[in-house]
Amino acid sequence: MKPKRVLLAALAAIFLWHFIQLASPQSSPVPGTLNGTVVYGYDGAPIRMTSIWIHEQLGKANFATQADSSGSFSIQLPAGHYFVLVGSPGFAPYSTTVWIKAGKLKKLAVRLRADSAILQNN
């Protein structure tokens, strides 16, 4: 009977340790990189100075960057799961989720569409 209790206690401890590890954000000393381009969906022209907001899924951190004159952006992020929102005046917002892995490059190609509500009011 005693060996069963020891085994159950050990299994419970391992399960608890794994649960805590999964629930807590893992900050890796080596960041990953989110690289991307933002273009107009109609003709592929770059959209410069577009805002990119990045929110860590567990709500622990927020980041922001901006596309350059060629519509390109790059930002280093701790490894994790992120919600990405891309916006520029006159265009409908774009959102997606990405996984960033330590030391790895994640590419994102964003094609924005003209905001039809703005076009209808002009």
Image: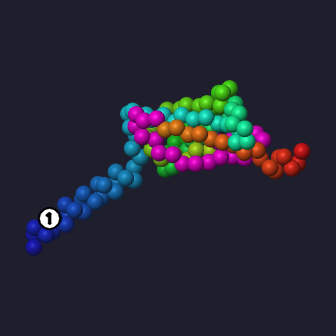
Amino acid type at circle 1 is: Val
Q: How many marks?
A: 1
Residue visible at 69% across and 32% down in the picture: 46
The residue where tag 1 is placed is 6
Chosen colour scheme: rainbow
Q: Looking at the rendering, in which quadrant would you find the C terminus?
A: top right
Residue visible at 10% across and 69% down in the picture: 2
Question: x%, y% of residue 64?
Answer: 59, 36
Residue 104 is one of the magenta-drawn residues: yes
Q: Looking at the rendering, in which quadrant would you find the N terminus?
A: bottom left
Residue, far right: 122
Quadrant in the picture for residue 44: top right
Q: Give above or below for 115 relative to 102.
A: below
Circle 1 residues within 10 Å: few <14, some 14–19, many ≥20: few
- Magenta residues span 86-105
**Is disc 1 placed on a helix, strand or loop?**
helix
Q: Give above or below for 86 relative to 8.
A: above
Question: x%, y% of residue 99?
Answer: 47, 45
Residue nearest the observer in this picture, 62 or 114: 114
Residue nearest the observer in this picture, 4 or 46: 46
Quadrant in the picture for residue 19: bottom left
Res 47 visible: no
Res 28 visible: yes
Q: Is 4 on the left-hand or right-hand side of 26? A: left
Residue nearest the observer in this picture, 2 or 118: 118
Residue visible at 22% across and 62% down in the picture: 11
Q: Is 5 on the left-hand or right-hand side of 15? A: left
Residue, far top: 69
Residue 95 is one of the magenta-drawn residues: yes
Q: Is 17 on the left-hand or right-hand side of 90? A: left
Question: x%, y% of residue 23?
Answer: 40, 53
Residue visible at 62% across and 44% down in the picture: 85
